[in-house]
Image (cartoon, rainbow, N blue to C red):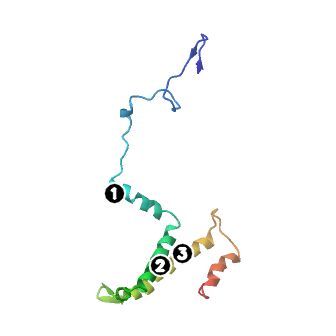
Amino acid sequence: MAGSDSGTVMWATGVPGSLVGDLKGTPMDRAPVRTRSPLVRMLSPLRDFLATEASGAILLATGAIGALVWANSPWSASYEVLWSSRAAVTIAGHTLDLDLRHWINDGLMTVFFFVVGLEIKREGRVTESGYVRLGTSNLCPFAGVPSGV
């Protein structure tokens, strides 16, 4: 409600729920709403799941359980065939020919421990507030390495 000098009462016009007066034009004049493609709508729950912190743990546990069931099932021979399948990488005449078990153990585990080392380094240097931590508490992760923890 707004007042004027003549003492009459004037009511502000506008659209219910809007903070300021009347909207210009009709709803057709507004910017068009972007519609998502069917593929994006279908994959959005997967994207939302993978964005959570627990998704990695859930996928790892699901894979481990699936591998245990497969290895102890009547189809365990196909499981062994998969692990003994061979793959080779050749660069400049040098060939690295390993079975899948060795690719996982030697290659991917190296990458895994490299990432873990980088994470320990980051955690040891910076706290959540961004300040450098000092003291012997930074040595705790490194103390577990020789014991295999």
Q: Which residue is mark 3?
A: 118
Q: Which residue is mark 2?
A: 65
Distance from disc 3 to disc 1, alpha carbons, whole Å, reads 36 Å
**Residue drawn at the location 69% of the way across and 76% of the way down:** 137
Q: Nearer the viewer, mark 1 or mark 2?
A: 2
Distance from disc 1 to disc 2, alpha carbons, whole Å, reads 30 Å
The secondary element bearing badge 1 is classed as helix
Vertical order, 74 against 135 (above or below): below
Q: In the rendered structure, which amino acid carries the disc numbered 2?
A: Ile
Q: On residue 113, which mark appears?
A: none
In the figure, residue 143 lies in which quadrant? Answer: bottom right
In the figure, residue 97 lies in which quadrant? Answer: bottom left
Q: Nearer the viewer, mark 3 or mark 1?
A: 1
Q: Nearer the viewer, residue 73 or 142?
A: 73
- What is the quadrant of the C terminus in the image? bottom right
- What is the quadrant of the N terminus in the image? top right
Sequence-earlier tag: 3 or 1? 1
Q: Nearer the viewer, residue 125 or 20?
A: 20
Q: Residue 114's spot in the image, x, y percent?
A: 50, 79
Vertical order, 23 against 32 (above or below): above
**Residue drawn at the location 51% of the way across and 72% of the way down:** 57
Tag 3 near tag 1, CB within 8 Å: no
The secondary element bearing badge 3 is classed as helix
On screen, residue 132 versus residue 76, left or right, reads right
Sequence-earlier tag: 3 or 2? 2
Q: Nearer the viewer, residue 103 or 28?
A: 28
**Residue drawn at the location 39% of the way across and 33% of the way down:** 27
Distance from disc 3 to disc 2, alpha carbons, whole Å, reads 29 Å
Q: Residue 14's spot in the image, x, y percent?
A: 49, 26
Q: In the rendered structure, which amino acid carries the disc numbered 3?
A: Leu
* Residue sticking out furthest to the right: 135
